[in-house]
């Protein structure tokens, strides 16, 4: 999880990484929780093999880039922060569960 400057978009979470299934699952979970999320068309795709999100055991992780304004809103609003965290945790848990079942 990284922070990014707002630029012209203070709300959208940019997702990247080589773990495309996990990335997409997190994006869907965040959108279902009321957050804006995109997985392409931004300048921080996190797809280099040496990117920290891709250096774990599976060599393919997910990267979340949160804009400054959204980070501030999450700090100030515990309920919104919990919604964000729960969405990400559930997506990761479901993804791990699918891998274990395969």
Image (spheres, rainbow, N blue to C red):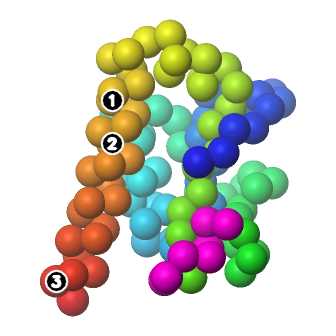
* Proximity of marks 2 and 3: CB atoms separated by less than 8 Å: no
Picture coordinates of residue 3 (x, y %)?
69, 38
Compared to residue 23, the image places residue 26 above or below, namely above
How many angstroms separate mark 2 from mark 1 (CA)?
6 Å
Residue under circle 2?
Answer: 87
Would you name the residue on which mark 3 appears?
A: 101
Measure how far apart labels 2 and 3 are at the Cα level. Answer: 21 Å
Q: Could you tell me residue 6's position as x and y percent? A: 77, 28
Circle 2 Cα neighbour tier, 10 Å, few/some/many (<14 / 14–19 / ≥20): many
Q: In which quarter of the image is the C terminus?
A: bottom left
Mark closer to the chain start, 2 or 3: 2
Where's residue 64, x and y in %? 59, 49
Q: Is residue 9 above or below residue 17?
A: above
Which residue is label 1 attached to?
A: 83
Identified at 56% across, 82% down, the residue is: 59
User: Which secondary structure, mark 2?
Assistant: helix
Per the image, is 100 magenta? no
């Amino acid at each position: 999880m990284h922070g990014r400057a707002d630029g012209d978009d203070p709300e959208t979470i940019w997702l990247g990484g080589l773990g495309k299934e996990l990335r997409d699952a997190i994006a869907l979970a965040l959108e279902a929780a009321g957050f804006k999320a995109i997985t392409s068309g931004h300048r921080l795709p996190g797809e280099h093999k040496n990117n920290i999100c891709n250096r774990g055991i599976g060599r393919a992780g997910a990267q979340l880039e949160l804009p400054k304004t959204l980070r501030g809103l999450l700090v100030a609003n515990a309920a919104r922060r919990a919604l964000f965290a729960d969405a990400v945790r559930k997506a990761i848990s479901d993804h791990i569960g699918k891998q274990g079942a395969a």
